[in-house]
Amino acid sequence: LKQRMQWWEDARLGMFIHWGVFSELGGEWNGVDYGKEMGTASAEWIYLMSEIDTNDYKQAAQRFNPKNYSPEEWVKSAKDAGMKYIVLTTKHHDGFALFNTKASDWNILQASPYKKDLIKQYIDECHKQGIRVGLYYSHEKDWYHHVRLRNDTSPIKESYKKLVKTQIEELLTNYGQIDLIWFDMGISAHKEFNQMCYDLVRKLQPNCIISSRIGNGLGDYKNLGDRELVNPGMNEYVESIMTMRLNWGFDKNDKNWKSSSEVISMISKSACRGSNFLLNLGPQPDGKFTPEETIRLKHIGEWMTLNGDA
Ligand code: JFZ
């Protein structure tokens, strides 16, 4: 474990990216703003929260055509901000795969006009520019293929298990080295399923780090609750995750930006306390970071140049 965690322990700062079909709706459906609930629910939960008809959501996917997507710019701005790893949503709770998958046609190649593998481009670019590659994958919550409920403890269907198994295999065999997989929202009622996911990753890429939200205490390090900062003296591998405003995913109406100095003070606190800090961006549907995000990254970069490796 110590060996596997070495780069991660040295990293201290990473970039989280929430992006997908939900970005297209920007937290709003039928004039209602769904990006206001504090805590978990926000723009990227819109498929569940708004009770939008699946056909309407599929239409949003048909509009999701990120022409300005440039992983080259994403990776460069992460590196310029002193970030050492990136974690990008490959499939969030809406079940939509941003990669080429045989397991379902609910994916970027078959259900959107873009028709290219977004994840492949991202991973290739990370490898090229030399930054650690993380993949967020919602293994349990999948409102499209599994159940469209906030909480569900019923047993997981065989067909869904098979889908997840196939997609994990695809992500960990088709793109070369993956440094981290960020499973989310695993619940203890699904121990066998979570264990299956864990074993599969270990088998396919033994050095790939696994987040604790896989469930059942199986992960390699501890994720704090959303937006929570580490307490002094926690001597485990700990990662805080933080948004720049309320929402994880792109939201048209959310103006609750933290200032650059607020964000920087959290980064420095987190590093002083020996934990990692994963700072979230919710790019626009066209693939660009918002101007507010870009300016914050720039300020972080300036601060990191002066203080980063001290
Ligand atoms: C999850 C997601 O539902 C959310 O959309 C986002 O991706 C976030 C990073 O993770 O939400 C959670 C999961 C766990 C906690 C809170 C929100 N928690 O343990 O406090």
Image: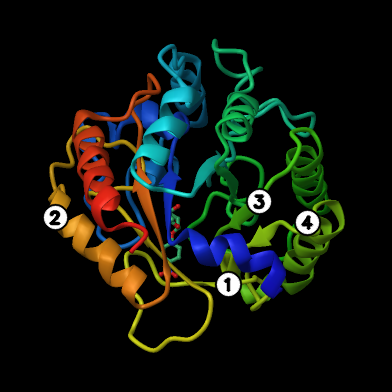
Residue type highlighted by circle 4: Val
Mark toward the start of the polypeptide (1 vs 4): 4
Q: Quadrant of ligand 1?
A: bottom left
Where does residue 206 sit, x and y in percent of width and height?
81, 59
Residue 221: give its label: 1
> Around disc 1, counting alpha carbons within 10 Å, would you say few (fewer than 14), some (14 to 19), or many (20 or more)?
some
Relative to 2, does residue 63 appear above or below in the rendering?
Answer: above
Relative to 155, does residue 34 appear above or below in the rendering?
Answer: above
Closer to the camera in the image, 272 or 207: 272
Q: Nearer the viewer, mark 3 or mark 1?
A: 3
Q: Which residue is mark 3?
A: 179
Mark toward the start of the polypeptide (2 vs 4): 4
Where does residue 145 sit, x and y in percent of width and height?
66, 42
SS at mark 2 in the image: helix
Measured in 3D between alpha carbons, the distance from the residue under mark 3 to the one under mark 2, in whole angstroms, is 30 Å
Measured in 3D between alpha carbons, the distance from the residue under mark 2 to the one under mark 1, in whole angstroms, is 28 Å
Measured in 3D between alpha carbons, the distance from the residue under mark 1 to the one under mark 4, in whole angstroms, is 15 Å
| Residue contact at pointers 4 and 3, CB within 8 angstroms | no
Closer to the camera in the image, 214 or 105: 214
> Around disc 2, counting alpha carbons within 10 Å, would you say few (fewer than 14), some (14 to 19), or many (20 or more)?
few
